[in-house]
Image (spheres, rainbow, N blue to C red):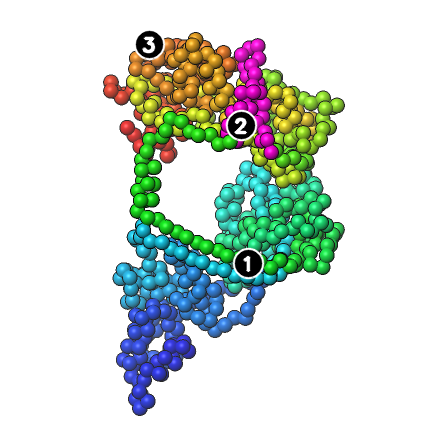
Amino acid sequence: MDQENRKEFKRSLPDTEVPSLDTLVKFINKVVADHGTEIEFDIRATSQPTPASFIPSHKSQKTEIKFSSAPQTSKRASRCSFCSEEHKNFQCKRLIETPAPERLDYVKEHKVCTNCLSPGHSTKECISKATCKKCSKTHHTLLHKDVQKPTDKNVNALTASASNNTHTILATAVVQLSNKYSQPWECRALIDSGSTHTFITSSLVNTLGLKRQELSQPMEVKGLSDVEMLTVTHQVELEIATAYSPDTLIRTSALIVRKTSGVHPRTSINPMTWTHLQSLTLADPLFYKSRKVDIVFGADVYPRIIRGAIIRGNEDEPMAQESAFGWIVLGPTVAPASNVSTCYFNSCPLDTSLGRFWEIEECPTTGRIFTKEEEECEEKFQATTSRNSDGSFQVELPFKSNMKPLGNSKRMALRRFYNLETKFEKNTTLRSQYTEQIHALLQDGHMHIIPKEEIIIPDHSSYYLPHHAVLKEASSTTKMRIVFDDSASTSSGQSLNDQLMVGPVLQEDLFSILVRWRYWRVALTADIKQMYLFIGVKKVHQDFLRIFWRDHPSDPIKTYRLAKVTFGTSSAPYLAVKTLQTLADSHAQEYPLAATVLKRDFYMDDCLSGAQTTQEALHLQEQLLQLTKKGGFLLRKWSSSDSAVLQAVQSEMREIQTPLNFDTDSTVKALGLIWNPVVIASNSAFIPVIHTGSPKEPSFQK
C-alpha cells in the first residue's frame, strides 16, 4: 500500500492484535468503496499468482523535451495522473475545477479508469465494486452528470480583488501559415527561445487540413500549458510567410499538442504611454490584448526569425526587437493598481424557457427593422447607383461613414501572388485554367490594366486584392473559380472588408423559399450566370479592387483594377441582391410575374419557383428571361419537372444536356439539395433530397 493508506490501516488496528489477511482485505475494500481511489500494491512474496492488473507496465524509452515557459519540478514517487502532484487522482484540484460535463473527456484524455480514477487499466478491467453515489452507475462520483437542471433557480457569484501586478509580456506575432491548398491562413504565435521545439495545436492543424506525420518514437514534453508532462506522437510540416520578403518561406516541423500556452497576456494592458513603439510596424498589432496562441515557435526556428535591431523604452517598459514578421514586443512592465469586481448572475425562470420556445415556433414576420448602419447602406445605394445605356447597373462600394484609413496592402498582395506562382509550378493545369479565366476577365471588360502614371497613389486610396483558386469538381459549368481575399489586413491592421458596410438581408430565408417551391406542380430552377460580374463598380472605387498578375514568371508583374462587383467583398451579396430587386421594381408593370419571383423566389443567384400548369410555367420562364436581360443578366442552367419548359430554351442553357439515367445523372444540385426533376407520379412532380453522399443513398426523401 502507499504510505497514506498504510498509516490509516495501522491506526485502525487494536494495539494488542496482529492483523490477519482478512482484516487487511476488508480495509482495502472499505477504502475502495468509500473513495474509489487508486491503491498501490507492493507484493513482495506470496504463494498465489500476482494479479495481472497489479503488475506495472514497462514504458518504452522516450525522448524528453524541456520547455521554458513553465516551471519544472523533480520527479516524485507517487504522482497524480492529471497534474503530477503528490496526491490521489480523485483529490486533484484540476480535475475538480474542470466543469462537470467536460470531466469525462478530461479523464479519458489522460487514460485513467473512469470508475476508480486509477491509471494502468480500462474501465472493463477495473476490479473496484464501487459505483457512483448519485446514480449507482459504473463511473466515479466526480464524473456524474446531472440530467435535470432547475429552470427557476438563481445562481449568484461575486468576487472582488485589488492588486498591483507586474506583467511580463512575451513576444507574439500574427503570422500566415499555408494550408493544404497553399493558401495563407492567419494565426497568432508565441516566440519562445527557451523551447527546444515548435508546437502547434491540433485544432489549428485540423483547420489547415495539414497531413499529420507519426513520430518514430513518442516524445515527452515538460512545462507546456501548465502540464508538467505530456506525450506527443505526431508532427506536421509548416510553411510560414515573412513580412519583409514575400517570396521567402520559413519551413519547419511542429509537434502537435492539444493546447499551447492558452491566452496571452493573461489580462489586457494599456500601451498608450509606450511612445517608443508607436511608429513601428508591429508583428502583433494587438500584442497588449488577451488573446489565444495557437503556435509556439521554439529555438529550432528562432535564429531565422529574430533580427539584430532593438528599441528600448524606460526601465519599466517592454522593448521592441526586429523580427521576420515585424517588430515583436517583450519584457516586464508594471500595470497600474486596479480594483477588480466581477459579478455573475444567471437566471432561467420558467417563463423565459416558454418564451424561447414560442420564439422558435413563431413564423417569421414579413418585415425587419433595419439598424442605423443598414439604413445608411440603403440610402447610399439609392443615391449612388446608376444604369448604363444597355440597362446594366453601376454601383459604388458602401464604405462606412467612420471609415478607418487603410495601410499598405501592396507588399502583402505581392507576397500572396508569389505563393500562388509557387503553386502553379507544381500544377501546370491549374496555371492554364487560372490564366484562361484572367484573360476572359480582360476580354469581357471585367478587368483593366492600370496605366503606369496612375499606379502610384496613397495607400489609403487603394487596396491590392490577394487572389487564389477554389476548385469545385461538382460544378457543371465552372470547375475552378478565382476568389479574391478582401479580408487580408493591410499594414494598419485594417482590411477592405473592415471598412465596408455589409448591408441588410433583403431576400426571404431559405426555409420559406424551399417550402414554397414544394407547392408548385410544375417546378423550375435556374441561376444567373456570373451575377457579380454583370454589375459594374464605378471608377471612383475601382482602385480599391487592384490585383497583380503575369502569365509567366519571366514576365514583368502588371497591376490591374477590377471593374465589377468582386466575389469576396463583404458588401457583394447585398449589392447583387439589391440590384436584382431594383431591377424588379423598375420593370414590375412590364413583367409582373417575373418581378414577383425575382424578389420572392431567388436565393442569391438561384431561382427556385414554379407554376400550377405548364402554360403558366412557360409564361413565367419567358418573363424571367426578358426581365433579367433588361438588367444585363443571363438566366441559364434551367431545369424543370416538365420537359416542355426545358424544350423552350436552347440545350446549352439547360442544366442537364444528356439523357437522364436514374442510377447516375438524373439529379440536379440546387442550394445544397439534390433534386430529381423527373416526373415520377401524377401527384408528386419532383423529389428534393438532402444530399449526404451518393444520390442512391439519400438521408431524406419525400
Going 55% across and 58% down the picture, which residue do you hit? Answer: 339
Kindly indicate whether the residue at mark 2 contacts the one at mark 3 (C-beta within 8 angstroms): no
Q: Quadrant of the N terminus?
A: bottom left
Residue type marked 3: Gln
Question: What amino acid type should be assigned to the residue bearing mark 1?
Answer: Asn
Name above or below for residue 28 compared with residue 693.
below
Is 409 included in the stretch rendered in magenta?
no
Badge 1: few (under 14), some or many (20 or more) residues near its Cα, within 10 Å? Answer: few
From the viewer's side, name the closer residue of 463 and 369: 369
Q: Is residue 595 above or below residue 169?
A: above
Which residue carries the number 1 mark?
339
Is disc 3 placed on a helix, strand or loop? helix
Q: Position of residue 563 (x, y in %)?
A: 61, 21
- Residue 203 position, x and y percent, is 49, 48
Residue pointed to by mark 3:
615
State which quarter of the image contains the C terminus: top left
Region rendered in magenta: 373-402
Q: Quadrant of residue 682?
A: top left
Relative to 463, is 289 above or below?
below
Q: CA distance from mark 3 to mark 2?
A: 43 Å
Instruction: Report, in whole angstroms, how far the alpha carbon at label 1 lies from the one at label 3.
Output: 75 Å
> Is residue 1 toward the left or the right of residue 498 in the image?
left
Image x and y of residue 693, in percent:
37, 34
Residue that label 2 marks: 376
Would residue 380 be counted in the magenta stretch? yes
Give me the C-alpha separation between circle 2 and circle 1: 41 Å
Q: Quadrant of residue 590?
A: top left
| Location of residue 174 with respect to 222 vertically, above or below | above
Q: Are marks 1 and 3 in contact (CB under 8 Å)?
A: no
